Image (tube, rainbow, N blue to C red):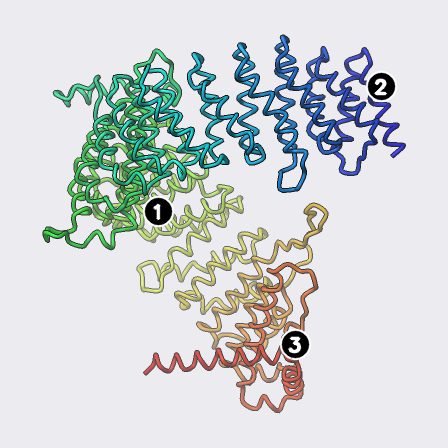
Amino acid sequence: MASVSYHISSLLEKMTSTDKDFRFMATNDLMIELQKDSIKLDEDSEKKVVKMLLKLLEDKNGEVQNLAVKCLGPLVGKVKEYQVETIVDTLCTNMLSDKEQLRDISSIGLKTVISELPPACTGSTMTANVCKKITAQLTGAIGKQEDVSVQLEALDILSDMLSRLGGTLYSFHSSILTCLLPQLMSPRLAVRKRAIIALGHLVLTCSGNIFSELTEHLLAELKRNESTSTTRTYIQCVAGISRQAGHRIGEHLERIVPLIVQYCDVDDDEVREYCFQAFESFVRRCPKEIDPHIPSVMGLCLKYITFDPNYNYDNEEEEEEMMETENGEDEEQESDDEYSDDDDISWKVRRAAAKCLEAVVSSRHDLLQDFYRTLSPALISRFKEREENVKADIFSAYISLLKQTLPTQSWLHTSDASGKGDVPLTMLRNQVPNIVKALHKQLKEKSIKSRQGCFSLLTELANVLPGCLADHIPALVPGIVFSLADKSGSSNMRIDTLSFLHVLLCNHQPEVFHPHIKSLLPPEIGSQPKRQYLLLHSLKEVISSSPADSLTPYVEDIWALLFKHCECTEEGTRNVVAECLGKLTLVNPAELLPRLRKQLSAGSPHARSTVVTAIKFTIADQPQPIDALLKGCIGDFLQTLQDPDLNVRRVALALFNSAAHNKPSLIRDLLSMVLPSLYSETKVRRELIREVEMGPFKHTVDDGLDVRKAAFECMYTLLESCLDQLDIYEYLNHVEDGLKDHYDIRMLTFIMLARLSVLCPSAVLQRLERLIEPLRATCSTKVKAGSVKQEFEKQDELKRSAMRAVAALLTIPEVEKSPVMAEFSSQIRSSPEMASLFESIQKDSASLSISESMDMS
């Protein structure tokens, strides 16, 4: 304690230096000390530190002031309650100072202290006492202070305190409400807004009586309707408190809603905007109580969403031309959520109405039929809205309508009472032509936000009604091509375009796109990873869904495009390129397969891996024209099993596995050449194992693991397709090694051993002694105490897999004559854990056998 006091005294002395750098460094050192959990201040040190920091709040140097106020946070937890009260008293007094800088820094100081006060649930009385002291001073400052800046700071601090410690101020809630209500009539807009915010974080913790008092006050003022400005404030306040405490305002809606409805017809756009914000809050927070008023709310929304004094409804063609010219600004020039008081603000009303409609649609799927009868046509008619933000909200509302439809398609096909058919879904299908007509011209505009909204909406529509856009592909393709080629567009816009194209390709018959293949081929793929991936996926769908004769004229263009990206660093992208190349090769294998073989000499490992993977996508389990050509050259591609690059060898193993599984005739004659390379890859290579540091821990990484797994997967496939071509004893040598390898490989070799017990029982019986030991080691393993849950689960699964292999070995004829098996069987019976596991495995096997026999019968 003595050494701490000495160190603190030394720092305090430096803080009195005339050199600002000395004061700064000393204050910084003090902050570091205060942040240490171990520091304990004696009473004298507490007093001196508090006094010095409060003095430094008035330092001439701003950096010193800022450090001093930061020190107050950790100091709160290091000093006694009366010292915290001293800090608070000083800060509150400073807030009323004539010096603006001192007021500002003291305001920050109060917020800092409040943020560090311990929660009341800890049992500390300090928080309650300090909060009461602050509250008394703040409410006094708010009520009496003529300086608006002081009022605003006091309201901010009060809001922070109510938000974090509202329950602690329970006994002050009434006086806080009394203080805040007059501020709703302040001539200053900023004061009114801060008061509304403070009343919102208050209604979260106040009593029912206080909440009712506030509600009655708001109702009385709304009925009084003395001026437009106060009406705006009170409606905004209703919206604010319903967002914060919608569950509490619900019981008052019967009296509130008629007043809000009445004010929607006031000739003031701001009032109307706040009315719709209030309705939106009611819909989201009080769905049960607002339910009787939904029809009138929807009616008002539709009334204002379809109203635009600047629209020329009598001449739609003129309107479309005007829209195409006026929406041609760049994305940076588009309006955003902010607006000046000088703007024509009627668009704000339409936007608030659209948001309110979205809330209704999102929460009421029971009204889908009504929505499609009245709401859907109204929204479609507004897809041509010129104001970008309003249009975005209208799109959003319609997308919500479609999302509500998607999970309910199972009951949408039921007939209505009149027996006229699947009402909502049929209505939507009938409206598709109008939707496309309203959107397709906008897809060719320069307005990025509009195009993005259009594609999002069309994507959702295609998901809800697969195939519904088949007749409209010719109208949509130009817009898709325009967006993909538009270099000025945002990445998100292109990604939305590609998502829509991908959905179209997946949901429609291939022949729909045949006339548009040339148009859909992208001029370039770009470098943005997500865009690359989606564009290549779309290209893959085009290639897969098109007959060879329709692709033939474009093969050279596509081939060149794909090879520009075969060396991409993203493996996912390379895989899609490889699939495209493989499927494209099937169009003209005689010409394109030799080209792929030639690329094996490419200098880049990424290029070689892409080419090898491409061959995998030319192999199918059914006969194909390419098979004869492939059989003659697949050996060249499998030579990459000896490639110096690890990843190339891995994909070569994947190619071999695919051939062995789908068309073994391709590789049967090559096994004598391939098997030495395959078996070589089952060995653990120490040079590929490295140690990495993860914080205080060291973690072993085996870069050769994926290649070994791929090799063992190939071995397993060969058991089923080429067993007669294998030297089973050499094969077993590598299985034995795998039984002692990594978790993933042991799991695979346990399965292989069980299969070998059926296919080659005599060979397995001869190797039994060498095979049993790794099984015994696995089944006997104990997980270290304190290991994570995942480690226990992993070991349990490993033991179960090993025991399945043991059960398979026990089915081999004459296995009981083996001393090593007899000994292991005895060990299993004598161990309660292993015996229970073995019994469980046998029950599983018996159940499976019964199930299979029932299937056969």
Query: How far apart are labels 1 and 3 at the CA level?
Result: 49 Å
Query: How far apart are labels 2 and 1 at the CA level?
Result: 74 Å
Question: How far across and down, in percent of the image, does residue 106 sit?
Answer: 64, 18
Quadrant where the N terminus sits is top right
Q: How crowded is mark 2: few (under 14 residues within 10 Å), some or many (20 or more)?
A: few
The extreme top residue here reads: 98
Residue 641: which quarter of the image? bottom right
Question: How far across and down, in percent of the image, does residue 476 sit?
Answer: 23, 36
Nearest to N terminus: mark 3 or mark 2: 2
- Tell me if I can see residue 700 in this picture: yes
Q: Nearer the viewer, mark 2 or mark 1?
A: 2
Q: Which amino acid, by three-letter code, is at mark 2?
A: Glu
Q: Quick one: SS at disc 2?
A: helix
Nearest to N terminus: mark 2 or mark 1: 2
Quadrant where the C terminus sits is bottom left
Nearest to N terminus: mark 1 or mark 3: 1
Query: How far apart are labels 3 and 2 at the CA level?
Result: 72 Å
Q: Residues within 10 Å of mark 1 (few under 14, many from 20)?
A: many
Residue 771, compared with residue 419, is above or below; it is below
Residue 704: which quarter of the image? bottom right
Q: Which amino acid, by three-letter code, is at mark 3?
A: Arg
* Most foreground residue, 679 or 784: 784
Q: Quick one: SS at disc 1?
A: helix
Write the residue at 28% across / 34% down.
357
Query: Which residue is labeled 2 in the image?
Result: 13
Number of marks in the image?
3
Q: Which amino acid, by three-letter code, is at mark 1?
A: Lys
Query: Which residue is labeled 3 in the image?
Result: 776
* Most foreground residue, 787 or 436: 787
Query: Which residue is labeled 1 in the image?
Result: 540
